[in-house]
Image (cartoon, rainbow, N blue to C red):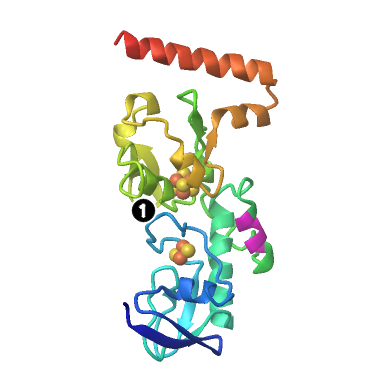
């Protein structure tokens, strides 16, 4: 049985088991902390920092999705400093990534009164849509590098290791090893990466074609033909 920890979040006295994150302690007490990169079934890596909170006595803001509770801790989730930090993160995302398929992030931008023009001189993430297989497309102009897809492809779920980070700094992006097309990678088309992507950067191919205005018959015939040729290629390597 774990030890119990008492703390306050926004003035509420809370008791949770040792090892609980600030995010989960808040959630269990109906206190909302926004998240972007966090997913209940993925390992938290604190990449986006939208969940930052203020812990009394700490010099820097703490990401609630990984920060653990401690005895007597006093946490604030909505101070001016926090709001400013979250707003800035959203403004930087707006400036560099296509968020048109990320309604939850767009709503956060409204809630935090983010000014989408604040960093208008930034370089935007602009890449061609990668359409190289019959199951899903990759539109990395919409990728916020949350790492969820990499994690479910690896030790969080599938143990396939088809995708990972590539490049450094601004050039960082998600890719297959050696940037090979998906059918030449170790991808088994489980779809888990598509399922956890929060921004539409990974999307089922049929949904994408539908959004492009292709008719259902056309889409079925196109993707079925692609799947058949792939099956034939696998049967006669
Ligand atoms: S492709 Fe989607 S899931 Fe993968 S890192 Fe980018 S935004 Fe996250
Ligand atoms: S949700 Fe905590 S850092 Fe992204």
**Residue 65 lies in the magenta stretch:** no
Q: Magenta region's main secondary structure? A: helix
Q: Quadrant of residue 174?
A: top left
Q: Residue at x 54, y 81 (%)?
A: 81
Q: How many marks?
A: 1
The answer to whether 152 is drawn above or below residue 73 in the figure is above
Specify the farthest residue to the front. Answer: 1
Q: Is residue 45 visible?
A: yes
Q: Which residue, given by chain and number where applicable, does mark 1 sit on? A: 169
Drawn side of residue 170 relative to residue 111, left or right = left
Drawn side of residue 237 relative to residue 59, left or right = left
Q: Residue at x 46, y 36 (%)?
A: 191
> In the rendering, at what x and y percent does residue 71 appear?
37, 88
> In the rendering, at what x and y percent does residue 198 appear?
53, 49
Drawn side of residue 110 relative to residue 46, left or right = right
Q: Residue at x 67, y 16 (%)?
A: 217
The answer to whether 66 is drawn above or below residue 122 in the figure is below
Q: Could you say which is closer to the camera, residue 211 or residue 27?
A: 27
Quadrant in which the N terminus is drawn: bottom left
- The span shown in magenta is 104-109
The answer to whether 33 is drawn above or below residue 13 in the figure is above
Secondary element under disc 1, as helix, strand or loop, is helix
The answer to whether 84 is drawn above or below residue 56 in the figure is above
**Residue 106 lies in the magenta stretch:** yes
């Amino acid at each position: 049985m774990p030890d119990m920890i008492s703390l306050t979040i926004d003035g509420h006295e809370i008791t949770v088991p040792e090892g609980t994150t600030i995010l989960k302690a808040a959630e269990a007490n109906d206190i909302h902390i926004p998240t972007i990169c966090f997913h209940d079934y993925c390992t938290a890596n604190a990449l986006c920092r939208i969940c930052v909170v203020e812990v009394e006595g700490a010099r820097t803001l703490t990401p609630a999705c990984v920060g653990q509770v401690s005895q007597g801790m006093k946490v604030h989730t909505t101070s001016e400093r926090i709001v400013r930090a979250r707003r800035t993160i959203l403004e930087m995302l707006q400036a560099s990534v296509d968020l048109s398929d990320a309604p939850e992030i767009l709503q956060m931008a409204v809630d935090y009164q983010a000014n989408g023009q604040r960093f208008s001189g930034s370089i935007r993430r602009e890449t061609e849509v990668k359409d190289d297989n019959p199951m899903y497309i990759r539109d990395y102009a919409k990728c916020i590098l949350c790492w969820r897809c990499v994690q479910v492809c690896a030790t969080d779920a599938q143990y396939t290791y088809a995708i990972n980070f590539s490049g450094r700094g601004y050039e960082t992006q998600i890719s297959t090893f050696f940037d090979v097309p998906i059918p030449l990678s170790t991808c088994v088309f489980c779809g888990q990466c598509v399922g956890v992507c929060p921004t539409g950067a990974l999307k089922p191919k049929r949904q994408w074609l539908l959004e492009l205005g292709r008719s259902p018959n056309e889409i079925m015939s196109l993707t079925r033909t692609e799947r058949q040729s792939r099956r034939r290629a696998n049967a006669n390597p």
